[in-house]
Amino acid sequence: MSNNYTIVVGERKKFNEDGSFRSFPGNTIVCNLADQPKVLDEIVWIQQEHSSKLPFAHKFTWNPLESFHMTVFELLCHYNRLTPYWSSLLDLETPLEEVDRFFAKALESLEFPERFTMKVERIYKTTIIVSPYDQATHQRLNHFRDLVSRVTGVRFPNHDRYGYHISFGYQQIQLTPEEEVQLKQFHHNLSGLLVERLNVIEMGKTDYTIFEDMTKFVAYTEHARALLQREKQSG
């Protein structure tokens, strides 16, 4: 693989060299944004601004509508079987379907946060940075994250400084120093416009979800993984 590609490209990574999505299965806790048309419109607008105004836009891949979400708690990815990014309650070789079921059972007793507000901060790389609207929301989410960590055995090195964000794409090819400067200025200008257009986001439901790649995150059921696998194979 060429050194021009970023770390998201290659075997056991999220993308192929042609920009298509590779199989990269795992599970996570997210707020899906599929039922928020205003937010979806703004994310699509951001993607279109990049595509139409950056001469190096071909170095990025944009996420589809179905994938837009804000992660509340990162769980596990099948290809990241390293102790800091795995559950202390599970063996590193545990099959993913068994991991799915273990987490579903462990999370049953928790009350997932619903109807809370996040403040739009800025655009950074290929994400929209958001933060809890007030201290009460901050404490609520932190408390939930600590409970999830306790029952799942998952505690990433950045647990106490996790930054909430919404990914709208991925950079797949390295930028030149000149392009880096141009992108930084572009994001500075675009961030100001975005905050004017979308100051806050009212989050709805938080779900324990699973995924086969970065295109779709679905609420866990006993049969959800098999359905996603069939979709991935047929696609």
Image (tube, rainbow, N blue to C red):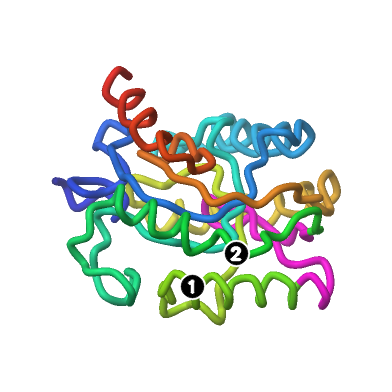
Q: Residues within 10 Å of mark 2 (few under 14, many from 20)?
A: few
Residue 59 in the magenta stretch? The answer is no
x then y, percent, for residue 130: 69, 60
Left or right: 84 as drawn, with respect to 131: left
What residue is at 28 percent from the left and 37 percent from the top? Answer: 22
Q: Are marks 2 and 1 in contact (CB under 8 Å)?
A: yes
The region drawn magenta spans 118-137
At 44% from the left edge and 45% from the top edge, which residue is drawn? 210
Q: Is residue 156 left or right of residue 190?
A: left
**Residue that carries the numbered disc 2 in the rendered image:** 109
Q: Is residue 138 above or below residue 5?
A: below
Mark 1 closeness class: few <14, some 14–19, many ≥20 residues within 10 Å: some
Furthest-left residue in this view: 1
In-front residue for pair 61/14: 14
Q: Going from the N terminus, do you reach mark 2 or mark 1 first? A: 2
Check residue 151 in the rendering and tell me which mark sits there, or answer none. 1
Q: Residue at x 66, y 34 (%)?
A: 34
Q: Amino acid at mark 1?
A: Val
State the image quarter where residue 177 is shown: bottom left
Main SS of the magenta segment? strand
